[in-house]
Amino acid sequence: MIDSNKIYDVIVVGAGHAGCEAALAAARMGMKTVLFTINMSTVAKMSCNPAIGGLAKGHLVREIDALGGVMGTIIDETGIQFRMLNKSKGPAVWSPRAQADKIEYSERMLHLLETQKNLELKQAMVTGVTIENDKITGVKLFTGSEVRGKSVILTAGTFLNGLIHIGLFSYSAGRDGEFAAKGLTENLVSLGFKSERLKTGTPPRLDGNSIDFDKMTVQPGDAKPQPFSYQTKAINRKQVPCYLTNTVEQTHKILLSGLNRSPLYSGKIIGTGPRYCPSIETKLVRFADKTSHQLYLEPESLRNNEYYVNGYSTSLPEDIQWKAIRTIPGLEKAEITRPGYAIEYDFFPPSQLRPTLETKYIENLYFAGQINGTSGYEEAAAQGLMAAINAVLKLHQQEPFILARSQAYIGVLIDDLITKEITEPYRMFTSLAEYRLLLRQDNADMRLMDYGNSFGLLDKEVYEQFCEKRKLIKDYYEDLQQIRPDLNAMNQILEGQNTSQLKEKENLYKILKRPEITLDKLNGIAEHPLFESNNDNRLMDQVRQQLEIEIKYEGYLARQNQQIERFSKMENHIIPEKIDYSKIKSLSSEAKEKFDQVRPRSIGQASRIAGVSPADISVLLIYLKK
């Protein structure tokens, strides 16, 4: 039942990954919060890949955790295979990833929602928002009821007028087996918002009993899994493997024979899909010279036997999907439990948002997740958390929380969304971060935990442990500059690592700058906690890792900090919000249009807008100076 007399502080619409983080954060910050979902049985459902993290996405999860979000702790509790990607490369691109037990993940999130103080979870479809004097007052439900609230966060995912395509057959759905959300897009458009269409897709799922894994290459997880959350001491769950196989020329021949019935190539789909994650049929057209494409068979849960075919997203007709899948090594007798499909949905170009994710047109209305044109559970969760923090801060009349590009991948994500033109589903890559050596996954706590603590989102014990870690790093950094080990003992280690020996004693700080030397190789070299073997002490593992990276990459880190200092002048040069760009005569017509659309917060943001030239920035600076 809906109590029409109740006024909520925060109303969250949609219980995907963005909505769950938003609702939990708002409630934990003391706000009377309600979360509306079309189906209470599918909160935090993994509609596509049953995994959390990955390249750059793992960085986002660790940042969410450092700010007090829950995605990291839940994947640690429900993950079934953990891997640190890119370990052969530099630490800036190391990225944690975990296969999730998608059933347990959703159940664990539901439990958190149902037991969270200040939070109510209700099943209902929201069809519109209510406003007064361009300020939010609540939401409308499909039953005709209205719910009043001081702020609203919309996290509608792919549900807004969702349309699923399998071959030339289409039907309305938010995702397979669930209703689409009707009415909300139309309501927002009537209030002045601009909406567009995007498309994404998913591969078929297979019955594991019908797969011949002996014909595939086993892909195990890490022997010593590293948790996502700073709260998790160790991963002790059962780990299961993934499997690698590949398409063959016969697979391609069958898939291409179905293009005349493809919604992508018949013009039936109008939404733009992601270039970075193309469907298998698009791969064949775009890379016609390739005779094979890798596929990863990933388990979806320990409770069922379904496998996700990573790399095989498709919306081709069911008969083509079935024939083609059976040409793949190990899948000759495969049974499809759910066909792959494409889904089109409405989104709202995020140039209509402020850096806080509040809309420019309606006060106290926030958008987060795929409604902003992003893809991925991690990008959605980060936005949901940031929207909730800012909604609460505004209700308390406090300064907004805006992360700079130099502070976090979350800062890069939101700045890209509100500054760049989103023409395809956006996802995070390490290449999008200018300062990625500073924004590593291992130091997310050092960058963000003070904020999480100030918002009241971190447990006291977690923050105290972080403070201990920070102090140890500082103290041990100084110790390493003072400790000069025995010359003979040190030279024996250096000789064993095929690096030049010392002629006189040297401090360990300088010795650790050698690429061949790590703290692990110096065990026993001095009486100090850093050189004692203790594989079960995660805190000390973190301290060691941070020290090694900071010492070995000190020059590069200093250079990036200098770049940030230079660029901060532009970022700190704030542009008045109500400036009339049409009156700046020397600006190009395109710059006037782009500036008026984006309403950049600073000169730095203005310089990143596509179509804006350095000359336009110079003109703007002169105008502001006058």
Image (cartoon, rainbow, N blue to C red):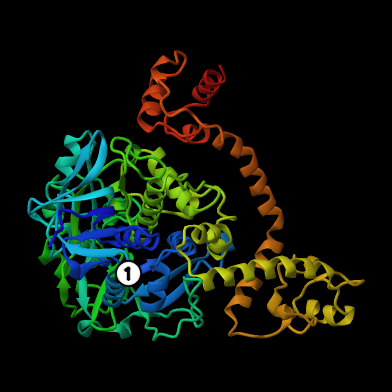
Image coordinates for residue 200, horizontal then vertical, percent: 25, 54
Name the residue nearer the viewer: 493 or 582.
582
Locate residue 491 relative to residue 244 in the image: left or right.
right
The residue at 79%/76% (across/down) is 494
Is the residue marked by circle 1 packed among few (<14), some (14-19), or many (20+) residues within 10 Å? Answer: some
In the image, residue 127 sits, relative to residue 546, either above or below, namely above
Residue 408 placement, left or right of 113: right
Residue hosting label 1: 116
Q: Is residue 280 visible?
A: no
Residue 436, located in which quarter of the rendered image? bottom right
Residue at the extreme top: 585
In this view, which residue lies farthest toward the front?
A: 5
**Residue displayed at 22% across by 33% down:** 192
Determine the residue positioned at 49% across, 60% down: 452
Q: How many labels sit on residues?
A: 1
Q: Kindly give the residue lying farthest to the right in the view shown.
A: 504
What secondary structure is found at the residue carrying circle 1?
A: loop
Q: Is residue 608 left or right of residue 108?
A: right
Given residues 367 and 408, the one toward you in this image is 367
**144 vs 251, nearest the viewer:** 144
x, y percentage for residue 2?
14, 59
Q: Position of residue 624 (x, y in %)?
A: 53, 21
**Residue 554 appears anywhere in the view:** yes
* Quadrant the N terminus occupies: bottom left
Residue 152 in picture, x, y percent from top left: 27, 49
* 342 up-or-down from 590: above or below: below
Q: Nearer the viewer, residue 186 or 206?
A: 186
* 3 to the left or right of 488: left
Q: Give the residue type that dot 1 points to.
A: Gln
Position of the C terminus by quadrant: top right
